[in-house]
Amino acid sequence: MSAKAQVAVGQDRVAYQWDDALEEWFLNGPRGLEHGFTVHQRPPGSSTLISDELRPGSQPSTPLHFTLAVRGSLRPEVASDGLGVRFVDGQGVTVLTYAGLKPLSLPTSFVSLLECI
């Protein structure tokens, strides 16, 4: 994203509204720090749905991809199932785990959650 986000801060939630289509959020709750994205609509130029968008069971014809950058000295290692990533230091020691990734509105079979590029 090249534009500046509008930031909304709540008691336990911070949200970045990047544009009309995408919101990124962080929630500090009982399960720890959660991070997520809410896609309000597919971006212009992305693939459309196979069937009527409002019909239950509609499936996207192609997955929606996010490319996230990693900064700092830790190295990401994606889990073999693609549903998590651990960040290791120079000695290979896990310092941070980002796990429990799942799409909330589509079956997992339609989404490849993490790829190491």
Image: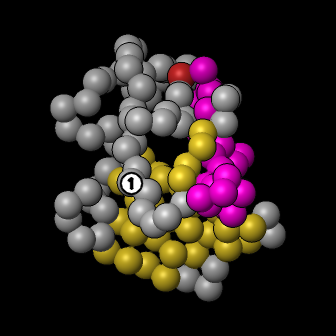
Q: Position of residue 17 (x, y in %)?
A: 35, 65
Residue bearing mark 1: 69
Q: Position of residue 51 (x, y in %)?
A: 39, 15
Taking the spot 54% from the left edge, 22% from the top edge, the residue there is 110
Taking the spot 67% from the left edge, 29% from the top edge, the residue there is 80
User: Which quadrant of the figure has residue 18?
Assistant: bottom left
Seen from the viewer's position, the closer of residues 113 and 61 is: 113
Above-or-below relation of 42 to 86? above
Q: Position of residue 14 (x, y in %)?
A: 51, 75
Seen from the viewer's position, the closer of residues 15 and 1 is: 1
Give the farthest residue toward the bottom: 11
Dividing the image into 4 quarters, which one contains the N terminus?
bottom left
Q: Position of residue 47 (x, y in %)?
A: 28, 24
User: Which quadrant of the figure has residue 71?
Assistant: bottom left
Residue kind at label 1, given as amino acid type: Ala
Q: Secondary structure at mark 1?
A: loop
Indicate yes or no whether the magenta region holds residue 95. yes
Indicate yes or no whether the magenta region holds residue 91. yes
Above-or-below relation of 42 to 74? above
Give the farthest residue toward the front: 91
Main secondary structure of the magenta stretch: loop
Above-or-below relation of 14 to 73? below
Give the farthest residue toward the right: 30
| Magenta stretch, residue numbers | 82-109
